[in-house]
Amino acid sequence: MPIFWSFICRSMVATSTAACLFVPVDALAQVAAPTISDGDTAWLLTSTALVLFMTVPGLALFYGGLVRAQNVLSVLMQCFAVSCLAAVLWLAGVYSLSFDNGGGAERWIGGMGKALLNGVGADSVSGSIPETLFFMFQMTFAIITPGLIIGAYVERIRFPAVLMFSGLWLILVYAPVTHWVWGGGWLADMGVRDFAGGLVVHVTAGCSALVVVAMLGNRRGFPNDVKPPHNPGMTMIGASMLWVGWFGFNAGSALAANGSAAMAMTVTQISAASASLAWMTIEWIRFGKPSMVGLVTGTIAGLATITPASGFVGPAGALIIGVIAGVVCFGAVQVVKPIFKLDDTLDVFAVHGMGGIVGTLLTGALAVPFLGGVGLPEGMTVGQSVWTQVVGIAATAAWAVAVSFVILKAVDATVGLRVSDEEEFEGLDISTHGERGYEI
Amino acid sequence: MPIFWSFICRSMVATSTAACLFVPVDALAQVAAPTISDGDTAWLLTSTALVLFMTVPGLALFYGGLVRAQNVLSVLMQCFAVSCLAAVLWLAGVYSLSFDNGGGAERWIGGMGKALLNGVGADSVSGSIPETLFFMFQMTFAIITPGLIIGAYVERIRFPAVLMFSGLWLILVYAPVTHWVWGGGWLADMGVRDFAGGLVVHVTAGCSALVVVAMLGNRRGFPNDVKPPHNPGMTMIGASMLWVGWFGFNAGSALAANGSAAMAMTVTQISAASASLAWMTIEWIRFGKPSMVGLVTGTIAGLATITPASGFVGPAGALIIGVIAGVVCFGAVQVVKPIFKLDDTLDVFAVHGMGGIVGTLLTGALAVPFLGGVGLPEGMTVGQSVWTQVVGIAATAAWAVAVSFVILKAVDATVGLRVSDEEEFEGLDISTHGERGYEI
Amino acid sequence: MPIFWSFICRSMVATSTAACLFVPVDALAQVAAPTISDGDTAWLLTSTALVLFMTVPGLALFYGGLVRAQNVLSVLMQCFAVSCLAAVLWLAGVYSLSFDNGGGAERWIGGMGKALLNGVGADSVSGSIPETLFFMFQMTFAIITPGLIIGAYVERIRFPAVLMFSGLWLILVYAPVTHWVWGGGWLADMGVRDFAGGLVVHVTAGCSALVVVAMLGNRRGFPNDVKPPHNPGMTMIGASMLWVGWFGFNAGSALAANGSAAMAMTVTQISAASASLAWMTIEWIRFGKPSMVGLVTGTIAGLATITPASGFVGPAGALIIGVIAGVVCFGAVQVVKPIFKLDDTLDVFAVHGMGGIVGTLLTGALAVPFLGGVGLPEGMTVGQSVWTQVVGIAATAAWAVAVSFVILKAVDATVGLRVSDEEEFEGLDISTHGERGYEI
Amino acid sequence: MKMIIAILKPYKLDVVRDALTAIGVQGMTATEVKGFGRQKGQTEIYRGAEYQVSFMPKVKVEIVVGDDMAERVVDVVRETAATGQIGDGKIFVLDLSQAVRIRTGETGVDAL
Amino acid sequence: MKMIIAILKPYKLDVVRDALTAIGVQGMTATEVKGFGRQKGQTEIYRGAEYQVSFMPKVKVEIVVGDDMAERVVDVVRETAATGQIGDGKIFVLDLSQAVRIRTGETGVDAL
Amino acid sequence: MKMIIAILKPYKLDVVRDALTAIGVQGMTATEVKGFGRQKGQTEIYRGAEYQVSFMPKVKVEIVVGDDMAERVVDVVRETAATGQIGDGKIFVLDLSQAVRIRTGETGVDAL
Ligand SMILES: Nc1ncnc2c1ncn2[C@@H]1O[C@H](COP(=O)(O)OP(=O)(O)O)[C@@H](O)[C@H]1O
Ligand SMILES: Nc1ncnc2c1ncn2[C@@H]1O[C@H](COP(=O)(O)OP(=O)(O)O)[C@@H](O)[C@H]1O
Ligand SMILES: Nc1ncnc2c1ncn2[C@@H]1O[C@H](COP(=O)(O)OP(=O)(O)O)[C@@H](O)[C@H]1O
C-alpha cells in the first residue's frame, strides 16, 4: 500500500497535533533531511519477516499437503526456489521497475535507476522507514505472488519451466502492474485503491494461473482418477502460517505502526474468521460434513479478499467481505474444475483470483464511513469508486492473461513445459529431484 | 494485562523524567487528546501475531500430535474453528462485555456499548496503543482459552457440541471473569494480580476441562486400552510455537515495549526452561527414561505457571516458579487420570489448571523485591496478598465449574455431546469430517 | 553485534541531527540517566522471539528430518533440552562471563558480577534497550550455538553426554569467545569484526563439531550403509524457519530498529537466496537433478556466511558472499565425509564452520564502500583488516578445538559418550527416550 | 502343519489374539492390508471434489499351527471376529510342508 | 480352491482389479511390499552422498478363487499387468485346503 | 517349487538377502509385519501413562525357488538370521503349484 499512500499518510501525520508530540515542529522546520521512526521501522522489520514466513514455509506447506505423497517435495522446492529467484531478481531490477521513477514512461513502468539498489544505502529513507526496508518489505510480496501460481501447475510441470516462467513473469507482469497501482502509474493516477495487493498480488496470480492450466493441460487422470490430499495436517499448518503472516502483509502495508495498521489487522482477522465459518457452513449443508481442508481454504479466501480493502474498511465491512468471500470462492471452486474442466489443481483462481476481484470491487463500495470505513476517494461517488476499481481489475487481468500467454509460449518453446507421463506417474519427487518425501 | 494496569503504568511513565525525554511536558499539557506510541504499537502488533500463532498452528499441533492418527484432523479443525468462532464473537460483543464499562453492573460484567466495535475507530486510543490493537491483542487471548479446553474432550465429542460449548463458554465464563480481573470488576478492585492470564486463561480453561470430562465421559478403552501419541514430533513443533508465542502473551501483556515487557519475557523464558528440566529430571528418575513428550509438557507447565506472575516477579522468582511448575504439574498428571479416573485426555487441568492455580498463588508471594519482584500490592502483607489471590482462584474456579456445567447440560440436551461408539472407533477424521490425516 | 558496537552506534546517533528530532538536546543534557527507545525495544523483543524460534522448532526440524525415522524424536529432544539447559546456565553465569566486566582478566573473560542477573532489574538499560532484553537476545544465541553442534553427533550419542557436553561447552568455549569478540576482550580490542556471530556462533560450533565426531566415532554403517533423510519436508520447514528467524539474528544484532538493521536484513536475504541458487545449480550440473535438501542446505550456508558480515557489507557484497557460500560449503560437504571419512552427520562443519570462516574472512575485504559496505575499520587497509579477521578465526578455532577435546574426554570418562550398538540400531527414540516418532 | 490366514477388521485384532493365546497359540504374524470385497470404502470430499476410497483397511493374520489345532483355531477366529456385518473377512487354510525356528533350528511343530 | 499371489507394479493395481471384477472375482486383498529382483531401485543423492534404494515398491495381491477360475485369473492378471518391461512381477499359485467367511461361517467356494 | 516364508528381525534383512543372492536366488519380496510371539514389545510411557506395545516389528520375506534349491535356502536363511536370541523368527515352507513371470509369460522355475 505502499509508497504513495505512505507519503500522504506521513504528511498528514506531520501536520496533526497528536503526532507532533513526538516531533517538535520547530525542530522539524530546521532540519530538511527526512527521518525515520524507530517504531514504524520495528513494525516493518517484523512485517517483512512475517510475509517471508507466509511463503516459506507457509504457502509451501499449504500447497504441499494437498498434492499426493510422491510430489510433496517438488511443491516445497518450487515454492522455495521461486522465493530465492524472486529475491535476486527483485534486487537486480524488478524493484526498480516497480518503484523507481520511470521518467517519460512513468505511467506505464518504472525506471532502472535503482537496479541493484544503486544509490540506496543504509541511511536512505522512504516515508518514515529506511528505504532498504521498504525494498525488503515489498520484496516479500514479489516472492509470494509467483509462489501463489504454483498451485495451478503442481504435479506435472518441468522444474526449469517453473524457474523460467516465474522469472519472466516477475519482470513482465508483476513489475508493470505494481508500478501502475503502487508505483505512481496510471491506475494510481486514476485513484484505484489496493491497500495490500488485491490487484497486484491476487488478481495477477489468479488470472495467470488459469492461463498456465490452459497451456500446460490437466493432470493425468483428472478429474476422476486423481488422489486426495496426502497430508491435510500439513495444509492446516500452512494455512495457519499464512493467516498469521497476513498480519504483516496487510497491517504492514500501512508502512507504520499506527491506528491504520491496527485497523488493518482487525479487519483482516474478522474477514478471515467469517469467511472460514461461511465456507464451513456451506460444506456442512451441502456435503453433510464440514471438512478441515474446507475450513482453512475459507480462511485463505477471506484473507485474499480483504487484502485490497484492509486499509479502507471497518469491522462491519470486514464481516460482509468475509462472508461474501466464503460464499463466492466456494462457488468458484465448484465451477472452475468440475464445469470448465480446467485443472487449476489447488484452486488458485477460485480462491486468490476471485478473492482479489471481489475484494477489489468491494473496496470501491464498502469504504463508506457508514460501515466504519475511511471514506471514498475524495470527490468520488460510490458508483465512480466502484467503476475505477472495475477498470483496475480489467486492466490487471487482461495484462496478466496476455503476457502470461506469451511467456508460456516462450517457455514451452525453449525448456519445455510438461514432464513425461512416466515422470508424472512416478511423481516429481523422484523423477525431477531424486528424493522421496517419506521414509517412515 | 490489560487496560487498567496499562493506564496506571502509562501514567507512571508520563510523570517519570526519563520517559519525558520523548514527550516535552508543555506540549503534553497543551494537547488533551491521548496519543499513541509507535514503538509500543509495533510491539503489540507483533504480540498479537505471536499469540494468534500460539493457537493456530501452535496449540493445534501440540494437541494434534498426541491423539491417535484417526483423530488428528479433528483436533486441528476444532482448534481452528474455535479460533474463527471466538474472533467473530469477540467482535460481536464479548470484547464489550469484558472491557466496556458495565455501568451499574460494573463489578460483575461490562456493558454492550462496544459491541461490533461501535464507536471505536482507527484513531481510538487505549493507553499508548490504538484501541483496535488492544481489541485484537485481547481477542487472541479469547481465542486460545476455549482452545485449551479442547484437550479434554478430543477423540469423542460431537463437532456441533464443540462450537456451541465454546461459543457459550466465551460469553458466560470468559467474558465475566475477564471483566472481574482485567476489566475493572470486583477482583480487580480487590487487588487480585494476574499479569497475563493465570486466572482468566488457565484457571478458567483448566477447571472447565474437568467438568467437560465428567459430563462427556472417558474415551472408550480408557485407561488401559488407549493409543500412544501418534506423532510426538508434531507435539514438539506445537510446544515450540507455544513457547515462542508466549513471549507475545506475557511480554505483550505489558502493553508497551519497555523494561516491564523485557522482564516479563525474561521470567517467561526462565520458568519455561526450568520447568522443562524439572519435568525431564523427574521422568528420568521415575521411569528410567526422559521423554520428549515429557520435556515439552514441562515447558507448557512452566509457561502456564509463570503467566500470572510474569509482570511481577524477577528472574530468581521465575526459577522457583519454574521448578515448582514442573514438579506440581507432573504430580497432577499422575493423579487426575490414574487416580481420579477422569480422562482429561491431554491433561488440560493438570497442566493449565494446576499451572494457573499455582502461578496465581505464587504471584501473591514471590513479587517481593527481595527476589527481584516489583513488590507486593501497595499496603498488603504477603499474607494478604496471597489471600487475595486465593479468593481470585476460588471465585474463578467456582464460576468456571458451575457455568460450564450448565452450558454442557444445554449442549447435551440440544445438539448432543458425544459421538457414537462406531464413530469414535473409526475416528473423528472420517466419521465427522470425511477426511483422512495421512495418505502416505 | 552487541553491546560495544551498540554504544558506538548509539553515541553516533545521539550527536546526529536527524536523530535529535526525537530527543530535544537540552532535555538530554539535563537528564543523566540513560533511556530506552520503545521502537528499538519493540524490534529487539521481536528479534529475541525470532532467534528462539530458530532453535525450537527451526533447527530441531532442520536436523530432525535428515536422520532416520527411529531417531527423529531424539534429535528434537536434544535441541529442546539443550535450549532449556542453555537458558538456565545463561542466567546462572554464562551471560555474566560473556558480558560483565572481567576486571583484571577483562581481555580474556568477563566477571561473575551479573550472575543470576544480580543487580539487573526491569529498568536497567543497555544501549537503547532494557538490559534484560539484551540479556534475552544474547541468550537466544547461546541457545542455538550448542544446538548447531547436535548435527555432528546425532543417532549415536548418549543423552547424558549431550547435556554434560553442551553445558560445559557453553561455559568453557562459548563464554570466553563471546567475551573476546563482543564483550570487550582481546579480539574486540584488535578490531575483529563479527556482526552477528560468524566467529562466536558458527566457527565455534563448526570446529567443535569435528572434534566431537573424531572422538565419538562414525555411525555404524557409515559411509556405505546409512539411511537417507526420513522426512525432507520436515527439513524444509526447519530451513524456512531458520531463514525467517535469521532476520532476528542478523537485523536484531543492530540492537536497534534503524537503517543498519534494515540493511542487515537486506544483505541476509540476498546472501540466503543467492547461496541457495548457487548450491542448486551445482547439484543440477553435477548430479543431474537439483534436490530440495540441497537447495535449503544452500540457504543455511548463505545465512551462516553472511552472519559476520551482515552489518558491514552492502547488497553487492551480499551477492558475492552468497555465491561463494554456496560453492565453498557445497565443496566442503564433498570433502569432510567422503574424503576425510569423518561422519559429521549433518554437515555442521561444512556448512556452519566453513560458512563462518569464509564469511568472517570476507567481512575483512567486502566492507569496502565501493561495494556498498560501511568501510573498513578506521585506519586499516584491506590487508590489515583481513589479517585481523584471520587472527580471529585462528584463535577461535584453536580454542574451540582444544577445549572441546578436553570436555569430551571428561564426558567420556564420566557419563560415557556413545550408546551401545544395539541401542544405535534400534534407534535412540525407543532406546533412550522410550518413544516412537510415528504411529501412523 | 497348517498356515491359517485370516483377513479381519482391524479393531478385531486384539480380541482374536487374546482368544488364540487362550487356547495355546504361541505366536502369529499380522500385516496391514487393503481389502477389496463386498464392503466398499468411504467417499471423501475435498473442496467439492469426490474421492472414492476403493478399499477397506483390513489386517491379515498368519498363524501356523499343528494339524490338530487347525480346526480349533479356525473356529476361535470365526467366533471372535464375527460381527455379522459385511466386511467381517475371511479365513483361508493352507498346508505347510515345513517350519523352522531360526534361533534353535527346531523344526516341525516344535518350531512354533 | 487356489490362492493366487501376484506381485505387481503399484500403478497396475487398479486396472488388474477392474479386469478381475469384470470376470467375476468378488474380492481380493492387497499389500504394499518391497520387491527385490532383476529390476533395481533408484539412487538418491543427498548432499552428495549416494543412497542406493535396494528395493522397488511393489504391490502384492492375494486372490482366492475356485479351481475352475484359477487359470482364467492368472491369464487376466498376466495380460493386464504386463508392460513388457523388467520388473512387471510374478504370479504364484498355491493350493488352498479351506476357506471360511467369518460373517456367515460359509465354507469353500461359497465363502469367497 | 516352494515358497519359503521367513519372519526375521528387520535388521537381518540385508544380510539374509546378500547371502541368498550369493547362492543364486534371483528375487524375493519383503513385507513389514507385526510379530506376536515369545518376544514381547516395549513399554512406552507418555506423561506417566504406560502403553504396552504388544508386537515386535518384523520383516517377512517370501522367496520362491525350485524344489532343489529349497533346502539350501532354508539353511542359508537360518544361518544368517540367527542371533541365538529370542525373537529370531521362523521359516515356513509351502508347496507352490505354479509360477508365472508377468513380463514374458514364462512359467515354472523359468519364471523365477
Ligand atoms: N476372493 C478373495 N480373495 C482374497 N481376499 C478376499 C476375497 N474376498 C474377500 N477378501 C478379503 O476379505 C475382506 C472382506 O470381504 P467382503 O466381501 O467385504 O465381506 P465378507 O467377508 O463379509 O464377505 C475383503 O476386504 C478382502 O480383504
Ligand atoms: N523368486 C522370487 N520369489 C519371490 N518374489 C520374487 C521372486 N523373484 C522376483 N520376485 C518379485 O517380483 C518382482 C519383479 O521381479 P524382477 O526380477 O524385478 O522382474 P521380472 O518380474 O520382470 O522378472 C520383484 O521385485 C519381487 O518382488
Ligand atoms: N505360530 C506362528 N505363526 C506365525 N508366525 C509366528 C508364529 N510363532 C511366531 N511367529 C512369528 O515369529 C516371530 C518370532 O517368534 P518368537 O516366539 O518371538 O521367537 P522365536 O522365533 O525365537 O521363537 C513372532 O514375532 C511372529 O512374527
Image (spheres, coloured by chain):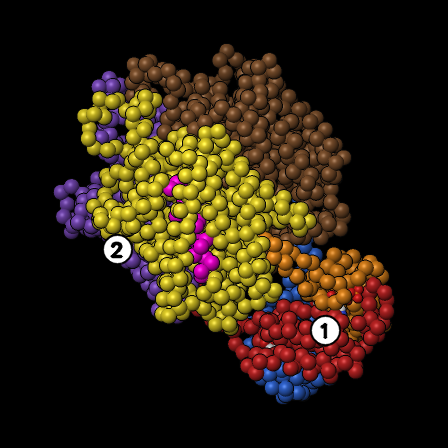
Chain colours: A brown, B purple, C yellow, D blue, E orange, F red
Q: Main secondary structure of the magenta part?
A: helix
Task: Check if residue A129 falls in the magenta segment.
Answer: no
The magenta span reads C192-212
- Residue C43 quadrant: top left
Residue named by callout 2: B320
- Is F88 or A348 nearer to us in this picture? F88
Which residue is rendered at x = 72% and y = 75% of the image?
Answer: F22
Which residue is rendered at x = 57% and y = 49% of the image?
Answer: C330
* A198 to the left or right of A311: right
> Ligand 2 falls in which quarter?
bottom right
Q: Is residue B37 above or below residue C203?
A: above
Residue type marked 1: Thr
Q: Is residue E28 above or below residue B138?
A: below
Answer yes or no: is residue D6 visible.
no
In the picture, the quarter occupied by the N terminus of chain C is: top left
Foreground mark, 1 or 2, reads: 1
* Residue C252 x %, y %: 39, 38
Q: Chain of mark 1?
A: F
* Residue A375 x %, y %: 47, 18
Which residue is rendered at x = 51% and y = 43% of the image?
Answer: C302
* F77 to the left or right of B210: right
Task: Check if residue C195 falls in the magenta segment.
Answer: yes
- Residue A324 quadrant: top right
In the picture, the quarter occupied by the C terminus of chain C is: bottom right
- Is E29 or C87 nearer to us in this picture? C87
Asked which secondary structure carries label 1, the reply is helix
Q: CA distance from mark 1 to mark 2?
A: 63 Å
